[in-house]
């Protein structure tokens, strides 16, 4: 069915293009909480400001974080130390003697962490690591432990994200009072120095990254409650894109707060009609209507419901997953639908589309659509890829297949009744990027 299209100006720039694989040339995991593999053997312990009446407190536990992620959960309160009238600290530190991989090849890159926080406004998050041969410029160790390199970081929201902390931002000369490298200690204490061209002696060097000896995560120098869920900590190459996820899926759309817009076949006398509403209490989208024959074309039209990420934002990255998974149910007779998603810099129509079918059941159904079912050169007449010059994704036509850059920059997601006439009533409960479903083993 022919329709008009609107081109929207993109207001942000994509920075990642290819997904990282664990222990790839672009990412080396240093620690996770799975208990398996070289990264899973490290043990963390939490501690709090122990002197001068420090009142900070924290807890650390390894927990199931959902969607297959096992996370280290670090929570507590960084409180004012009464004697110092300044915030204290809480930290978790590795307490084992297991070795870490050589990450010197990542010297121009960053220490990377996949984290989420229920307190993203907390300003005192820091990360540190020790290394064999590391020495404080003054020749003495830190009051809080052996010499270590430290840098601050921030968390942008409550969803999972990968935080990159450049190795060039770490300094071994940080203050016991603030955790920062730019402050002067009270009572005539020393001025601390960050890593700069004037103070290379405090910087991380490639040889030191050959033998990391410990990892630490801090809440320090800022009073308040904090929470940080940690999926993994690793070292990433310069310019490295977002790594493969640890979980089985990631929700793309917050259904309860989503806002949708409708488009029904607008040209050549199209008669299709639809309505949509969001049940915030039940966290479901109700999309219903009827796809009708366009009289002039004598072919079915379409009903399209689309939702978009907030302005200047995008949905969580789908790179590293195997496709899109929908949880929905149908009570109308129409059971053939299509799903689309839009991203920056994609093909002729600006979005990828694939078809899916529902069974006759009125129960909730989970539908998985693999990436290779999508194309960005779909038919204006049917929404499919086999008619009117459309091209399906295949080894012969990789140019129409979803790219990793597109998967990482999804802005718009749509559900379509298209190409088949009939009444429909859909309830949509989840739209997520997911790993391919596990196939049950065959019985011999």
Image: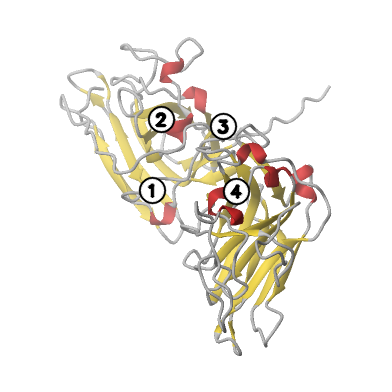
Residue at mark 2:
338
Q: Of the residues under marks 3 and 2, which one precedes in the sequence?
A: 3
Disc sitting over residue 111 in the figure: 4
Q: In the rendered view, does 207 fall on the left or right side of 315?
A: right
Q: CA distance from mark 1 to mark 2?
A: 16 Å
The kind of secondary structure element at disc 3 is loop
Disc sitting over residue 322 in the figure: 3
Q: Of the residues under marks 1 and 3, which one precedes in the sequence?
A: 1
Residue 168 point in image, percent of width and height: 54, 49
Residue at mark 1:
286
Q: CA distance from mark 1 to mark 4?
A: 44 Å
Q: Residue at coordinates 60% horizontally, 63% vertically from top-left?
A: 173
Q: Of the residues under marks 1 and 4, which one precedes in the sequence?
A: 4
Q: CA distance from mark 1 to mark 3?
A: 27 Å
Residue in front for this viewpoint, 238 or 2:
238
Disc 2 versus disc 4: nearer the observer: 4
Residue 356 point in image, percent of width and height: 47, 29
Q: Residue at coordinates 63% horizontally, 69% vertically from top-left?
A: 75
Q: Is residue 178 above or below residue 291?
A: below
Labelled pair 1, 4 in contact (Cβ < 8 Å)? no
């Amino acid at each position: 069915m022919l329709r008009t299209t609107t081109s929207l100006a993109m207001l942000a720039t994509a920075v990642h293009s290819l997904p990282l694989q664990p222990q790839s040339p672009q990412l080396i995991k240093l620690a996770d909480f799975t208990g398996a593999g070289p990264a899973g053997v490290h043990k963390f312990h939490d501690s709090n400001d122990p002197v001068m009446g420090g009142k900070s407190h924290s807890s650390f536990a390894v927990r199931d974080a959902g969607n297959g992620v096992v996370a280290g959960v670090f929570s507590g309160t960084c409180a004012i130390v009464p004697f110092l009238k300044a915030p204290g600290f809480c930290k978790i530190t590795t307490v084992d003697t297991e070795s870490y991989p050589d990450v010197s090849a990542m010297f121009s890159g960053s220490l990377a962490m996949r984290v989420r926080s229920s307190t993203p406004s907390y300003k005192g998050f820091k990360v540190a690591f020790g290394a064999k041969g590391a020495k404080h410029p003054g020749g003495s160790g830190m009051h809080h432990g052996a010499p270590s390199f430290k840098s601050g970081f921030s968390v942008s929201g409550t969803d999972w994200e990968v935080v990159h902390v450049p190795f060039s931002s770490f300094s071994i000369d940080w203050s016991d009072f603030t955790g920062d490298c730019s402050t002067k200690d009270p009572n005539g204490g020393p001025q601390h120095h960050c890593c700069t061209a004037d103070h290379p002696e405090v910087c991380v060097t490639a040889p030191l990254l050959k033998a990391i000896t410990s990892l630490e995560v801090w809440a320090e120098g800022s009073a308040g409650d904090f929470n940080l869920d940690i999926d993994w900590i690793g070292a990433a190459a310069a310019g490295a894109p977002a790594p493969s996820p640890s979980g089985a899926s990631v929700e793309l759309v917050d259904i309860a707060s989503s806002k949708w817009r409708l488009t029904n076949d607008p040209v050549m006398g199209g008669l299709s009609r639809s309505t949509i509403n969001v049940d915030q209490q039940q966290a479901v989208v109700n999309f219903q209507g009827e796809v009708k024959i366009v009289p002039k074309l004598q072919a079915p039209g379409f009903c399209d419901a689309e939702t978009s990420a907030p302005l200047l934002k995008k949905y969580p990255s789908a790179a590293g997953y195997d496709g899109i998974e929908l949880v929905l149910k149908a009570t109308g007779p129409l059971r053939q639908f299509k799903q689309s998603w839009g991203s920056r810099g994609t093909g002729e129509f600006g979005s990828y589309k694939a078809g899916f079918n529902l069974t006759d059941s009125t129960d909730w159904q989970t539908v998985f659509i693999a990436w290779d079912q999508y194309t960005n050169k779909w038919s204006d007449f049917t929404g499919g890829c086999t008619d009117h010059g459309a091209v399906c994704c295949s080894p012969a036509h990789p140019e129409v297949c979803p790219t990793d850059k597109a998967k990482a920059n999804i802005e718009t997601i749509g559900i379509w009744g298209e190409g088949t006439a009939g009444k429909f009533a859909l309830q949509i409960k989840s739209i997520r990027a997911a790993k391919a479903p596990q196939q049950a083993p065959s019985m011999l």
